[in-house]
Image (cartoon, helix red, strand yellow):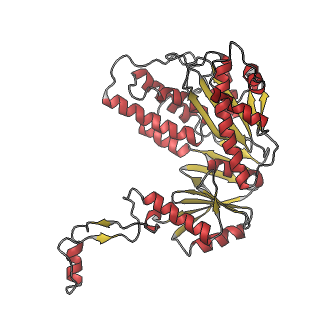
């Protein structure tokens, strides 16, 4: 999620974002240990024919000078090689909170790294071109110009207007074709709130399990990428991945049909506001099988979501206040992480981090440490929020339920409410 924060930050400041690709990145990694491999068949015969006087042992081995894609340590070797050049040669430093983001404040450059894809962010095109020229001295790269896609996500960035849109329309189209949904009827909500989801009482076939897991895996990728509106429905169905029923499979396909209907929706970032805020909520005892509550939160920057979560709570909350307090705790930890990222980048420009909840009981309990019969059972770890409040790191604020932007992360909503929730998420 960290790269979304940087992209949103770039949008608010109308910075340029260029992309470069490292050609065969892993093979450019400087290997840091002695690794030998058996020569491919025919290679030794070729050497003997080319160099008849060359002395070759009976069981020859080849020593690697560079990493290969088949090595389990190739990713680590490549990162260390790239980080060494960026830090020791080009004057960058890796963020403590996110080692795959590098910053050079003196040269006004931020680099987001994802394996072999580098997004270069700067307000000045000359600084970007200078960096590209220097990085070419160390690696073979391919220049891709102003960013159009990142991690399989399409990026539509209107620099002049200060608007960025992220979507996965192409990937959704591939899934629709893969699962034979080209002729499906339009679906306008991902999950009907009237449906009760319970475990399968029979044993699912291997084919059904594989199909269901493939669908859920694809939906999770989209959920984490650009479609927080399907987070709750996807996470809820994923609980049945080990033994899905036909109903579970049909509902998973229904989410895909919903995505097909709404495939043009994109997360939208704008130049205003340039502040960060969070919303959290909980649905008390909403799970039909375990009576556990579901928490949800969403964090905004540049008027769009940069981080979100929908999760079944690990314990059975014994009151609405406890369920909401657990949600506040989870959201506050993510807020601290986001705040730390922005501070390291040098762009956290607000006194406190606002965190909104629609539960007065949890809000008052967080601010006022009064123990009584109804709350003494609550685990101490959920009072982490109190420490953050006392230190002035976050500010816990009340918001009416009708304005709660995290509502759709905790339960299925009717069409009118879901449409409002989706608008809250800046999906246009």
Image quadrant assignment for residue 84: bottom right
**In this view of the protein, which residue sits in the foreground, 226 or 256?**
226
Task: Reply above or below: 260 against 198.
Answer: below
Quadrant in which the N terminus appears: top right
Asked if one can make out residue 289 in the rendered structure from this viewpoint, the answer is yes
Instruction: State the residue in front, 188 or 13.
Output: 13
Task: Decide if residue 100 is on the left or right side of residue 30.
Answer: right
Q: Looking at the picture, does residue 300 appear above or below residue 5?
A: above
Q: Residue furthest bottom?
A: 53
Residue 306 image point, x, y percent: 66, 42
**Residue at x 73% of width, y 63% of height:** 105
In the image, farthest residue toward the right:
351
Residue 304 in view, yes or no: no
Tell how many labels: 0
Determine the image quadrant of residue 103: bottom right
Left/right of residue 306 with respect to residue 272 in the rendered view = left
- Residue at image point 62% right, 74% down: 133
Picture coordinates of residue 222, whole percent (x, y): 54, 40
- Spot the residue most to the top: 373
136 horizontally vs 164: left or right: left
Rendering coords of residue 10 (x, y %)? 72, 54
Quadrant of the image containing the C terminus = top right
Q: Position of residue 426 (x, y in %)?
A: 70, 38
Residue found at x 52% / y 26%: 236
Q: In the displayed structure, does residue 398 sit left or right of residue 179?
A: right
């Amino acid at each position: 999620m960290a790269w979304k924060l940087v992209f949103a930050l770039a949008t608010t400041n109308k910075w340029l974002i260029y992309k470069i690709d490292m050609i065969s990145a892993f093979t450019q990694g400087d290997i840091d240990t002695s690794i030998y491999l058996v020569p491919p068949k025919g290679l030794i015969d070729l050497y003997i024919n080319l160099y008849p006087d060359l002395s070759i042992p009976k069981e020859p081995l080849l020593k690697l000078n560079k990493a290969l894609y088949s090595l389990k340590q190739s990713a680590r070797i490549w990162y260390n090689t790239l980080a060494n050049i960026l830090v020791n040669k080009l004057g960058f430093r890796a963020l403590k909170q996110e080692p795959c983001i590098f910053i050079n404040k003196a040269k006004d450059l931020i680099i987001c790294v994802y394996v072999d894809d580098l997004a270069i962010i700067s307000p000045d095109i000359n600084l970007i071109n200078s960096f590209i020229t220097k990085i070419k001295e160390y690696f073979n790269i391919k220049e891709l110009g102003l960013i159009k896609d990142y991690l399989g996500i399409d990026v539509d960035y209107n620099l002049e207007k200060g608007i960025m849109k992220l979507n996965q329309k192409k990937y959704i189209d591939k899934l629709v074709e893969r699962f034979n949904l080209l002729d499906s009827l339009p679906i306008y909500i991902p999950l009907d709130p009237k449906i009760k989801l319970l475990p399968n009482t029979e044993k699912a076939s291997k084919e059904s399990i594989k199909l269901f897991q493939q669908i859920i895996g694809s939906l999770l990728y989209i959920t984490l990428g650009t479609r927080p509106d399907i987070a709750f429905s996807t996470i809820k169905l994923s609980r049945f991945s080990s033994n899905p029923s036909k109903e579970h499979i049909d509902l998973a396909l229904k989410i895909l049909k919903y995505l097909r209907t709404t495939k043009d929706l994109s997360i939208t970032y704008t130049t205003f506001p340039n502040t960060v805020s969070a919303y959290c909520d909980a649905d008390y005892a909403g799970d039909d099988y375990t009576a556990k509550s579901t928490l949800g939160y969403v964090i905004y920057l540049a008027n769009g979501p940069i981080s979100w979560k929908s999760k079944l709570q690990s314990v059975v909350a014994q009151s609405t206040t406890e369920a909401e307090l657990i949600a506040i705790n989870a959201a506050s930890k993510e807020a601290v992480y986001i705040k730390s990222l922005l501070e390291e980048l040098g762009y956290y420009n607000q006194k406190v981090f606002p965190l909104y909840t629609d539960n007065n009981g949890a809000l008052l309990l967080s601010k006022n440490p009064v123990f009584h019969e109804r709350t003494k059972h609550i685990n101490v770890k959920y009072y982490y929020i109190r420490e953050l409040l006392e230190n002035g790191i976050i500010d816990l604020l009340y918001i009416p339920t009708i304005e709660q932007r995290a509502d759709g992360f905790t339960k299925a909503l009717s069409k009118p409410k879901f449409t409002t929730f989706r608008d809250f998420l800046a999906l246009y």
